Image (cartoon, helix red, strand yellow):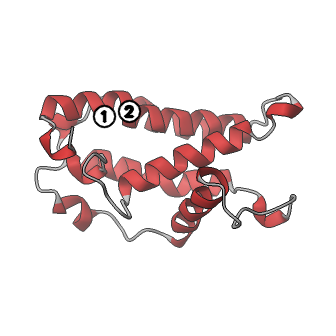
Amino acid sequence: MKTKDLSEIQLHKYFDEHVRYEVQMLLNATGAILKQTPISQELQYMPIESYAIHLRNIITFLYPFSRRDTDVCANDFFIDKSSWLEVRPKISEILKTAKDRADKEVGHLTTSRLSGTPEKKKWNVKELTDELMPLLKLFCESSDKVKLTQSIEPLLKQYVRIKD
C-alpha cells in the first residue's frame, strides 16, 4: 500500500507499532552501550549495530533523503505535509554523517567500510542520541496529534533517565 493511501487510523497504528518500535530499540541499544552491559565476545558488535540501524531509520524518517511511495516519513503525520519541513531544523552534520556511516558500515557491503578498530570507527552514542531526541520531541509536539499515540511520551521521558 502506498503511504498516501493510509487513513488516519492506519497511520496511527503504524506510528504506534513501527515508529515507536524504532525509538524503543534505539533507546534500548543506547542504554546497553552507555551502561556497558556485559555481552559475550561473539555478540560484542550487536548493540552498536542495532543502534546504528535504528538511528539510521529514525534519521531517514525525520529527514527522508530519497522517498519511495511506500516509505512512511515524519511529514505524513501532518495535515499540511510541508509543515514538518518548515518546523524542523536543517539536518545537523553529526546526524548526516551518522546516517551516511550507517548506510556504509551496517546497511550495505561496500568498500567504504572501515577495517580494523581505528578511533574513527567508534560511534559517539551519547552525542548522537542527544542530538536526535530533541528532534523526536519537536516532531511529537508539532505533528497532527490524531495520527500519533501517547505511547511515545514515556520513551521520550525514558531517555532523560538514560542520560542521567
Q: Amino acid at mark 1?
A: Phe
Q: Residues within 10 Å of mark 1 (few under 14, many from 20)?
A: many
Name the spot of residue 20 as percent of width and height, x first.
40, 33
Q: Quadrant of residue 36?
A: top right
Mark 2 residue element: helix
Q: Amino acid at mark 2?
A: His
Q: Quadrant of residue 161?
A: top right
**Residue 103 visible:** yes
**Residue 133 visible:** no
Q: How many numbered circles does the render carry?
A: 2
On screen, residue 74 versus residue 116, left or right, reads left
On screen, residue 113 versus residue 4, left or right, reads right
Identity of the residue drawn at 11% across and 50% down: 79
On screen, residue 40 versus residue 45, left or right, reads right
Q: Nearer the viewer, residue 57 or 82?
A: 57
From this view, report whether residue 21 is shown above or below residue 55: above
From this view, report whether residue 35 is shown above or below residue 67: above
Q: Nearer the viewer, residue 36 or 108?
A: 108
Image quadrant for the N terminus? top left
Q: In whole angstroms, how far apart are the C-alphas of marks 2 and 1?
A: 5 Å
What's the mark number on residue 70?
none
Q: Quadrant of residue 105?
A: bottom right
What's the mark number on residue 15?
1
On screen, residue 22 versus residue 109, left or right, reads left
Location of mark 2 (residue): 18
Labels 2 and 1 touching (C-beta < 8 A): yes
